[in-house]
Image: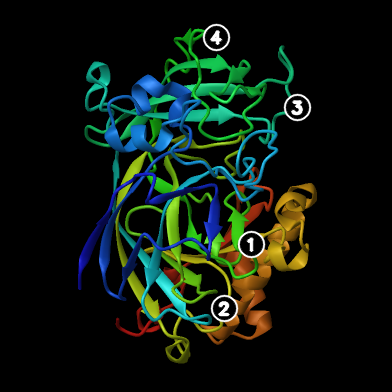
């Protein structure tokens, strides 16, 4: 076993997409461990607290008229003319990687164990050692066209501070309504439509003393984590799919194991969209977006070894914790294959919790019938009385429902997975 470290830099991040075409940042073997730094793409909502003085963050977010450190931001076109910029913001999350896994082939399953998760403290002398994050009630949020106070509509940024002493929690510091921001290339952003735009705080009105009696329990986790799909060379980081991605489940934190079906040689794992806290649904648009560092262990399960394990027949992401298994249903199980060449833009027009629930039901039924050898009638009875279905997110275009079953209902669950 070897331990690798992957720090953030313009050379080790890719912004807004998963890709089978990007050169790997590192190649590892099954059983290796990694420390991986990740940055929130919302750090420039408060540059002073989340970027200033941090060499890694400053190198990635550097953008002047003369030089843009990470030019492509999104899976859109990279040839001018642009409306917003290279990539056109068709995908927004800063992802660290890709990590290639030696010997990984389509049909295999990659297990990613999250061993630890730590906040990235501010390096600004004014906030030394303190940790911050940003939440946005955004135009893609569920609430955006259902507001009751003026101005309507509006996007609101709330900056939180994360207290890491003892049991971690977050408290709101201030908020502000988004006002048009002009980027270094002269493009005016009337809304939050392109990642990494630095907010000029002289143009916004900060409102303090908000959520004054509220402490939000921290749930450090990675909102976006997964493998490169095979269907396209560059795939937006926003809609989740059959190889993972922007699932946005707060349970994908320390102690969790995620299983992903491998779609391309090398697997090409990437991780980002780090969160301090999020509720089921991520209703307003984002979680508390913060920068995190994680310790991971990677185990490659070859396709010829999957029979008789919990991975038999797995064609979608699955979570395992000490207490439960969870499968993820989406409006479209594989929107890239189902919606054609414009899938990455069209998927948001078809968002449906009904379809996501149907997909989650089918996936959990398959798991119970294949892995636990239940009949269909037994599986349906068990789902109705012991499984929990919840809304994972309603903000990522390909909406999500997770279906979970507790391990304690099976007396022999510890014998389902072969030893590594």
Point out the tag, 4 or 3, that comes first from the N-terminus. 3
Residue sitting nearer the eye, 215 or 315: 315
Q: Nearer the viewer, mark 4 or mark 1?
A: 4
Q: In 3D space, how far apart are the residues under numbered discs 1 and 2 (Cα atoms)?
A: 15 Å
Point out the tag, 2 or 4, that comes first from the N-terminus. 4
Question: Where's residue 118, x and y in %?
Answer: 28, 44
Secondary structure, mark 3, is: loop
Residue 23 in view, yes or no: yes
- Is 124 above or below relative to 332? above
State the residue position of label 1.
Answer: 329
Label 4 Cα neighbours within 10 Å, binned few <14 / some 14-19 / many ≥20: few
Q: Nearer the viewer, mark 1 or mark 2?
A: 1
Point out the tag, 1 or 3, that comes first from the N-terminus. 3
- Is 89 above or below relative to 408? above
Q: In 3D space, how far apart are the residues under numbered discs 2 and 3 (Cα atoms)?
A: 39 Å
Instruction: Give residue 220's quadrant in the image.
Output: top left
State the residue position of label 2.
Answer: 368
State the residue position of label 4.
Answer: 203
């Amino acid at each position: 076993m070897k331990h690798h470290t992957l720090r953030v830099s313009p050379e080790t991040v890719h912004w807004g997409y998963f890709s089978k075409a990007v050169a790997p940042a590192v190649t590892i073997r099954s059983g290796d461990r990694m420390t991986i730094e990740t940055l929130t793409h919302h750090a420039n909502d408060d540059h002073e607290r989340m970027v200033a003085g941090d060499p890694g963050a400053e190198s990635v977010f550097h953008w002047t008229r003369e030089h843009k450190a990470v030019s492509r931001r999104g899976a859109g076109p990279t040839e001018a003319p642009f409306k917003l910029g290279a990539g056109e913001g068709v995908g927004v999350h800063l992802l660290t990687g890709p990590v290639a896994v030696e010997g990984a082939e389509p049909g295999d399953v990659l297990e990613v164990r999250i061993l630890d998760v730590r906040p990235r403290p501010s390096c600004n002398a004014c906030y030394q050692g303190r940790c911050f994050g940003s939440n946005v009630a955004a135009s893609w949020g569920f609430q955006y066209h259902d507001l009751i106070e003026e101005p309507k509509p509006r996007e609101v940024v709330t900056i939180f501070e994360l207290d890491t002493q003892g049991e971690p929690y977050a408290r709101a510091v201030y908020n502000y309504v988004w006002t048009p921001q002009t980027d270094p290339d002269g493009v005016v952003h009337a809304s939050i439509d392109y990642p990494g735009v630095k907010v000029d705080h002289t143009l916004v009105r900060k409102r303090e003393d908000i959520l004054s009696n509220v402490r939000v329990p921290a749930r450090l986790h990675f909102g976006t984590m997964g493998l490169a799909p095979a269907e396209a060379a560059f795939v937006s980081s926003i809609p989740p799919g059959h190889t993972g991605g922007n699932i946005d489940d707060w349970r994908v934190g320390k102690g969790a194991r995620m299983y992903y079906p491998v779609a391309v040689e090398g697997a090409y794992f990437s991780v980002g969209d780090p969160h301090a806290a999020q509720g089921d649904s991520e209703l307003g648009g984002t979680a508390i977006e913060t920068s995190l560092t994680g310790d991971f262990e990677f185990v490659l399960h070859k396709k010829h070894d999957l029979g008789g394990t919990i991975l038999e027949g797995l064609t979608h992401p699955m979570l395992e914790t000490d207490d439960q298994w969870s499968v993820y249903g989406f409006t479209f199980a594989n929107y890239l294959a189902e919606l054609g060449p414009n899938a990455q833009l069209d998927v948001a027009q078809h968002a449906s919790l009904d379809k996501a629930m149907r997909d989650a039901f089918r996936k959990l039924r398959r798991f119970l019938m294949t892995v636990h050898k239940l009949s269909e009638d037994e599986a349906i009875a068990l789902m109705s009385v012991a499984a929990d279905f919840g809304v994972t997110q309603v903000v990522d275009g390909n909406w999500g429902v997770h279906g979970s079953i507790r391990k304690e209902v099976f007396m022999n669950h510890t014998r389902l997975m072969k030893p590594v």
